[in-house]
């Protein structure tokens, strides 16, 4: 983390403990009893009794640029699903703010107490006996066994199954069960071999591969794919061949259990959540109603924020300039390095997958101009590990602030042209391109068109693409021509996966929350085993170094984790697993009427906006 970004981390603000959706029924509304006027007599002069006026409901107005596509969090990596799932469904544990506003802690949600360690590799979780789905059905150990088995269902290949089998903890045989029958994995694995067991009706047992802490267990079970599945509804939504499910695609195909009911869902317009006053965690939440508007375009968002119809706004570069001195503005470093994902499978691009071509692209990126002028107020980055990585380690030392992170930054800067930073070197970029042309047998007068994919409503992807169009024309002397290729919101990952000949690179970020403890985990999404991102040529050296990092973590040596992460980052730079652009910095406007519970931004928790109060 740069010194400037470190200052931001200590002094800034934040939003998310991000959430996501659940619940489809609200308790019956109660009608106030009719007031009977007090009887009067000629001698009586006192006024009739009156009831105090009911308090106005506290309504929080928020927005997203894209609607959720499912309330079943295991099936997709789209983060737009998280808010509804988190608020309207439940997890075993929840993060909540400390009373002093300086940190957070875990509270049992669908569990009833902290995890209990049985032996070095065995933990038990006692479940809340009164826990029920919103329709009244109980949530028992059988519910959780069913949920976890379906998340790991090898027929479904759920996109976020990895969050269950190996994230903060690694569950015995869970990964083998999910990948059974594929290369490198056992042909068959019985569910009974997986380290998830029912002890009794209200206790489950988790067997882990390596020693972990209670905090690791709690962190592991707060991801959006970990909400309990309602078994009967889920079974009714399963296809006859067992390969697909419609569970969670509408309020009729899903059942929640959270502190909010998912009250109405007008798709691509508004989601409305109403507080579940009978929920065991109701006292933690102050909003009576949450309106989540789906607003793809920025101008309507700004207008609604200024008119008081929104309590939150994440302004783009141009809009942000108008608010930099506004006391409502909060800032904090993000969990990601924004990058250009590289396509190594485009059969229409003769250079696709060539390492020299990828290095040419890497050195042709003027990251400082993109970060400070095109987007403004970002931090240029020619490396991969984000500025928060390591912030929740036992020592609290971020990788970027360590001698190992500094070594990589110094090395990258040494590749830069005179007066430049972060690896930007036009002459070196052109030399690498000529090597790539020679590698694939292209004549030097060949023009290659590159398709840069970005969402059509993106306020960052489009200006970066337009900037690079002119830059590439100059640096590569007309040999590489960028075609900006906009796509509809929510379709980028589908295009990446199913239409490899329609793009060459795309604007993405891949934040990994567990990297706050283990910095090397930022590379989880770059590995061949992560099926949600099949865009790279993976090397044996890269995979071997990732394993070396994991072994260092098992041995509980954070110093060695940092050193091995440095080696992995150097290998990633050699392979050019993608093209890093900048360290994200978040800028958000919070309405004056919102009283946040936190006095500072806390990595892994943020500013606790969902636990805030409304003060008119």
Image (cartoon, rainbow, N blue to C red):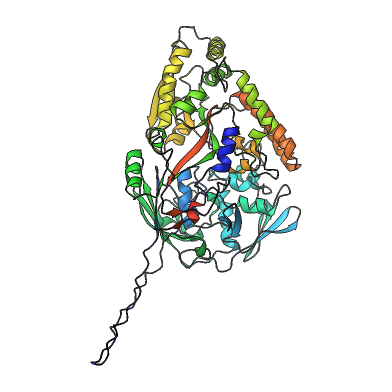
Judge from the rendering whether residue 321 lies leftward or rightward of residue 367; answer left or right.
left
Which quadrant is home to the N terminus?
Answer: top right
Judge from the rendering whether residue 19 lies leftward or rightward of residue 252; answer left or right.
right
Residue 566 can be seen in this image = yes
* Camera-side residue of 280 and 60: 60
* Camera-side residue of 88 and 415: 415
Which quadrant is home to the C terminus?
Answer: bottom left
* Camera-side residue of 343 and 305: 305
The vertical placement of 553 against 364, above or below, is below
Give the tally of numbered discs.
0
Give percent across and percent down for residue 330: 48, 43
The vertical placement of 310 against 580, above or below, is below
- Taking the spot 72% from the left edge, 55% from the top edge, the residue there is 122
Q: In which quarter of the image is residue 428?
A: top right
Give percent across and percent down for residue 325: 43, 39
* Camera-side residue of 49 and 314: 49
- Taking the spot 42% from the left edge, 22% from the top edge, the residue there is 467
Judge from the rendering whether residue 102 lies leftward or rightward of residue 277; answer left or right.
right
Residue 239 can be seen in this image = no
Give percent across and percent down for residue 371: 49, 28
- Taking the spot 40% from the left edge, 39% from the top edge, the residue there is 323
The vertical placement of 237 against 477, above or below, is below
Q: Quadrant of residue 520?
A: top right
Give percent across and percent down for residue 134: 46, 64
Q: Residue furthest left?
A: 42
Judge from the rendering whether residue 455 lies leftward or rightward of residue 552; answer left or right.
left
């Amino acid at each position: 983390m740069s010194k400037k970004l470190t200052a931001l981390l200590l002094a800034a603000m934040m939003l998310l403990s991000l959430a996501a959706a659940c619940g489809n029924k609200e308790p019956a509304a109660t009608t106030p009893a009719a007031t009977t006027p007090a009887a009067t007599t000629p001698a009586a002069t006192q006024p009739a009794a009156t009831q105090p006026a009911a308090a106005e409901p506290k309504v929080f107005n928020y927005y997203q640029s894209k609607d959720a596509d499912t309330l079943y969090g295991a099936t997709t990596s789209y983060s737009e699903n998280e808010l509804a799932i988190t608020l309207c469904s439940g997890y075993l544990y929840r993060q909540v703010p400390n009373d002093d506003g300086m940190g957070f802690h875990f509270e049992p949600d669908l569990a009833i107490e902290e995890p209990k360690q049985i032996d070095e590799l065995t933990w038990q979780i006692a479940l809340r006996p009164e826990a029920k789905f919103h329709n009244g059905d109980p949530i028992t150990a059988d519910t959780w066994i069913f949920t976890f088995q379906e998340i790991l269902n090898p027929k479904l290949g759920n996109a976020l199954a990895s969050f269950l089998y190996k994230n903060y903890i690694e569950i015995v045989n869970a990964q083998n069960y999910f990948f059974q029958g594929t290369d490198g994995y056992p042909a068959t694995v019985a569910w009974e071999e997986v380290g998830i067991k029912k002890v009794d009706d209200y206790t489950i047992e988790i067997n882990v591969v390596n020693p972990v802490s209670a905090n690791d267990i709690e962190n592991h079970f707060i991801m959006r794919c970990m909400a309990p599945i309602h078994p009967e509804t889920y079974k009714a939504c399963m296809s006859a061949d067992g390969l697909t499910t419609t569970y969670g695609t509408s309020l009729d195909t899903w059942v929640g259990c959270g502190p909010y009911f998912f009250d109405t869902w007008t798709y691509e317009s508004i989601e409305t959540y109403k507080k579940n006053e009978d929920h065991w965690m109701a006292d933690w939440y102050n909003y009576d109603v949450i309106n989540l508007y789906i607003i793809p375009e920025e101008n309507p968002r700004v207008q609604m924020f200024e008119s008081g119809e929104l309590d939150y706004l994440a302004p783009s570069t141009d809009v942000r300039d108008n608010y930099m001195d506004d006391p409502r503005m909060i800032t904090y470093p993000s969990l990601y390095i924004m990058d250009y994902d590289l396509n190594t499978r485009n059969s229409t691009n003769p250079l696709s997958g060539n390492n020299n071509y990828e290095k040419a692209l890497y050195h042709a990126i003027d990251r400082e101009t993109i970060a400070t002028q095109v987007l403004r107020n970002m931090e240029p980055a020619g490396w991969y590990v984000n500025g928060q990585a390591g912030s929740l380690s036992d020592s609290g030392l971020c990788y970027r602030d360590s001698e190992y992170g500094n070594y990589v930054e110094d090395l990258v800067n040494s590749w830069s042209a005179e007066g430049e930073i972060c690896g930007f070197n036009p002459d070196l970029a052109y030399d690498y391109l000529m090597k790539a042309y020679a590698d694939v047998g292209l004549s030097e007068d060949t023009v290659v068109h590159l398709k840069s994919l970005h969402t059509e409503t993106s306020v960052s992807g489009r200006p970066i693409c337009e900037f690079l169009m002119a830059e590439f024309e100059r640096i590569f002397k007309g040999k590489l021509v960028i075609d900006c290729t906009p796509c509809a919101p929510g379709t980028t990952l589908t295009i990446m996966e199913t239409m490899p000949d329609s793009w060459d690179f795309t604007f993405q970020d891949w934040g990994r929350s567990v990297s706050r403890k283990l910095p090397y985990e930022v590379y989880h999404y770059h590995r061949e085993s992560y099926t949600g991102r099949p865009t790279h040529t993976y090397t044996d050296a890269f995979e071997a170094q990732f394993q070396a990092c994991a072994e260092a973590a098992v041995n509980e040596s954070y110093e060695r984790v940092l050193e091995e992460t440095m080696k992995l980052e150097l290998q990633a730079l050699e392979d050019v697993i993608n093209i890093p652009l900048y360290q994200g910095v978040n800028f958000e406007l919070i309405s004056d009427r919102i009283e946040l519970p936190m006095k500072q931004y806390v990595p892994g928790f943020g500013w606790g906006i969902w636990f805030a109060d409304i003060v008119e």
